[in-house]
Image (cartoon, rainbow, N blue to C red):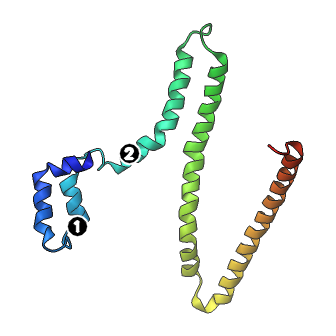
């Protein structure tokens, strides 16, 4: 589908033919976008695509919840209604609190070393080494605690349901 639309586009074909002699060295991404975007307006909307993709699960849950809510109490499936109510709460927490916090933590993890290096002078490298060592030590202690908790769970799982 993508190739067929481009194949029939004379403007795009002439643009490619013009740049063929230079082995497409003069082809730029903005120019390609300009030539292709009118053919695919939906592909040029990256932000709208991301929001639509990201919001699809909450929309579906909210729609199912509202469909059950609109039914009269006698015809309503109370089990489904309770499940959709609980699902609505969890989806709201996950999608609107935890995902953005996770994204923010990833960004901070990328910026953290730069911030540390900008704050500490090169003369105080011993301070930087101390901060990094104790940060690593703190993370290692957290990792050991989580390992012990997981090991206990694995031990119980192994003895409760062996072979499954």
Q: Position of residue 48 (x, y in %)?
A: 36, 45
Q: Position of residue 94 (x, y in %)?
A: 60, 43
Quarter of the image for residue 21 reads bottom left
Q: How many numbered marks have been drawn onto this rendered protein structure?
A: 2
> Is residue 160 in view?
yes
In the image, 148: left or right of 101? right
**Residue at the (74%, 76%) spot, across then down:** 134
Give the SS element for disc 2: helix
**Residue at the (56%, 81%) spot, across then down:** 117
Q: Kindly identify which residue carries mark 1.
A: 28
In the image, 46: left or right of 14? right
Give the SS element for disc 1: loop
**Residue at the (66%, 17%) spot, across then down:** 78
Quarter of the image for residue 120 reads bottom right
Label 2: how many Cα within 10 Å (few below 14, some 14–19, many 20+): few
In the image, 2: left or right of 56? left
Note whether 86 is above or below 154 in the view shown: above
Note whether 67 is above or below 129 in the view shown: above
Front residue of 59/156: it is: 156
Q: Going by the picture, which residue comes out furthest to the top?
A: 74
Choose mark 1 or mark 2, whichever is in front: 1
**Residue at the (10%, 59%) spot, across then down:** 14
Q: Going by the picture, which residue comes out furthest to the front?
A: 163
Quarter of the image for residue 133 reads bottom right
**Quadrant in the picture for the N terminus:** top left
Label drawn at residue 49? 2
Q: Position of residue 20 (x, y in %)?
A: 15, 69
Note whether 51 is above or below 125 in the view shown: above
Are discs 1 and 2 less than 8 Å apart at CB? no
Q: Position of residue 92 (x, y in %)?
A: 58, 38
Label 1: how many Cα within 10 Å (few below 14, some 14–19, many 20+): few
């Amino acid at each position: 589908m993508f190739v067929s639309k481009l194949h029939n586009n004379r403007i795009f074909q002439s643009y490619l033919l013009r740049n063929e002699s230079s082995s497409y060295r003069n082809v730029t991404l903005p120019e390609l976008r300009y030539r292709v975007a009118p053919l695919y307006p939906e592909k040029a909307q990256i932000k709208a695509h991301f929001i639509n993709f990201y919001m699809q699960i909450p929309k579906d849950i909210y729609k199912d919840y509202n469909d059950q809510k609109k039914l009269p109490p006698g015809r309503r499936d109370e089990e489904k209604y309770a499940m959709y109510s609980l699902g609505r709460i969890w989806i709201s927490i996950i999608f609107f609190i935890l995902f953005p916090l996770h994204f923010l933590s990833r960004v901070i993890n990328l910026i953290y070393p730069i911030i540390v290096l900008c704050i500490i002078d090169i003369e105080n490298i011993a301070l930087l080494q101390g901060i990094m060592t104790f940060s690593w030590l703190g993370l290692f202690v957290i990792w050991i605690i989580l390992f012990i908790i997981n090991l206990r769970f694995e031990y119980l799982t192994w003895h409760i349901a062996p072979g499954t």
